[in-house]
Image (cartoon, grey):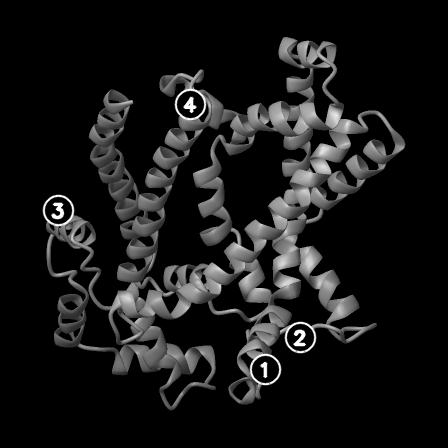
């Protein structure tokens, strides 16, 4: 165990450094940049905002920023340095968690991320809880009734659920339950109501959860097929093992065998890759849902920052997610090995491949 932890820690920094390199190069070689975005904003706010294309071209030729203004912008955004200098400055800032200031939010990157974090945490946590509360019991029932009409119908239902794109499902839910054409049951915009400040504590909790019902349902729906099928197959594989037949010979009931033996051993498959999956729900699955339901979280922040070439925010988001994924992988492997000592720690990467 100690040797494995030491080995993973030694691989930690090279892996993180490689992710930083890839993210930095990806961001730096995107077409356009923050300077172009500033110039575009200047043009939009100019007196010829509604002018024709020809008038805009003549304005750019006659009123375009001079070299001193461009040089000032380059210095402001750090582009007066070489690519190599910018890279090492970025590595130092990321490793020391000094992400700097956003180019366009006029505040530190940490402040920007802290403002958006509660939305992503709320979506991720509720989606995670709902997914496991529904999919694990459903998978167990499908395994116990393998081949029955219930198993077939639930399998078709989860397959259809998996096939519907998350964004399309969100639109359908808005049409049916958000006042689009049928019932106006759930709110479709924002996190809280206008009178949120006047509500009691439990009233605020109910209002907050009420606004998250449709977004969480959208994010959880696609996980039904994967998680329930994974649970079912893990249990069926364990039911074929010799220890199950031995327990039956001893007279143990099917429920006792399931609860005391099968679920414990099947948990190794369910927990393989638990860390990355957990973080993926939190930070990478909610961009379209945040856009559709006007929820200002980290997913929407990353997308907007990438469009505006707000490099400090983009790099900070990439870095935090990469760091959490690496740590999540390590924790997942250690938890998996502690639950089942028969599993070699060197083989946990193969189990993670099953989950991916």
Label 3 sits on a secondary structure element that is helix
124 shown above or below 41? above
Query: What residue would you read off at disc 2?
Result: 187
Q: Please, which residue is most extreme toward the front here?
A: 251
Marks 4 and 1 sit apart, C-alpha to C-alpha, by 46 Å
Label at residue 193: 1
Query: What residue would you read off at disc 3?
Result: 84
The 10 Å Cα crowd at callout 1, few under 14, some 14 to 19, many 20 or more, is some
Query: What residue would you read off at disc 4?
Result: 348
- Is label 4 in contact with label 1 (beta carbons under 8 Å)? no
**Residue depth check, mark 3 versus mark 2: number of the one nearer the observer:** 2
The one nearer the camera, 145 or 292, is 145
Q: Position of residue 309 (x, y in %)?
A: 33, 62
The one nearer the camera, 55 or 175, is 175
Marks 3 and 1 sit apart, C-alpha to C-alpha, by 49 Å
The answer to whether any part of residue 304 appears in the image is no
Label 2 sits on a secondary structure element that is loop
Q: Which residue shows up at 26% across the image and 83% down it?
A: 63
**Residue depth check, mark 2 versus mark 4: number of the one nearer the observer:** 4
Q: Position of residue 7 (x, y in %)?
A: 24, 24
Sequence-wise, the earlier of marks 3 and 2 is: 3
244 shown above or below 290? above
Q: Which residue shows up at 51% across the image and 49% down it?
A: 281
């Amino acid at each position: 165990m100690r040797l494995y932890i030491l080995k993973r820690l030694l691989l930690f920094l090279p892996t993180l450094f490689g992710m930083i390199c890839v993210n930095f190069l990806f961001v730096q070689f995107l077409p356009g940049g923050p300077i172009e975005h500033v110039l575009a904003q200047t043009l939009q706010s100019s007196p010829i905002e509604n002018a024709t294309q020809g008038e805009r071209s003549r304005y750019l030729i006659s009123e375009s920023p001079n070299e001193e203004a461009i040089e000032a912008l380059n210095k402001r955004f750090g582009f007066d340095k070489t690519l190599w200098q910018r890279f090492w400055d970025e590595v130092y800032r990321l490793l020391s968690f000094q992400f700097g200031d956003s180019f366009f939010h006029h505040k530190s990157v940490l402040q920007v991320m802290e403002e958006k974090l509660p939305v992503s945490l709320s979506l991720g946590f509720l989606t995670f809880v709902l997914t496991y509360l529904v999919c694990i019991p459903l998978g167990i029932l499908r395994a116990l009734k393998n081949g029955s009409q219930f198993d077939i119908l639930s399998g078709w239902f989860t397959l259809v659920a998996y096939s519907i794109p998350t964004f399309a499902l969100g639109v359908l839910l808005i049409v049916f339950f958000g006042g689009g054409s049928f019932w106006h049951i759930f709110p479709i915009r924002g996190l809280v109501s206008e009178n949120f400040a006047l509500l009691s504590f439990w009233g605020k909790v109910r209002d907050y959860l009420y606004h998250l019902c449709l977004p969480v349902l959208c994010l959880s729906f696609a996980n039904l097929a994967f998680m329930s099928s994974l649970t079912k197959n893990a249990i069926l594989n364990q039911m074929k093992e010799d220890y199950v037949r031995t327990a039956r010979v001893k007279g143990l009931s099917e429920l006792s065998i399931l609860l005391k033996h099968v679920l414990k051993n099947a948990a190794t498959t369910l927990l393989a890759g638990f860390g990355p999956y957990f973080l993926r729900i939190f930070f990478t699955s909610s961009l379209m849902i945040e856009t559709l339901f006007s929820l200002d979280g980290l997913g929407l922040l990353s997308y907007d920052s990438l469009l505006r070439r707000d490099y400090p925010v983009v790099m900070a988001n990439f870095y935090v997610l990469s760091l959490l994924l690496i740590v999540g992988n390590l924790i997942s492997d250690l938890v998996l090995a502690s639950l089942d000592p028969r599993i070699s720690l060197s083989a946990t990467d193969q189990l993670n491949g099953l989950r991916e």
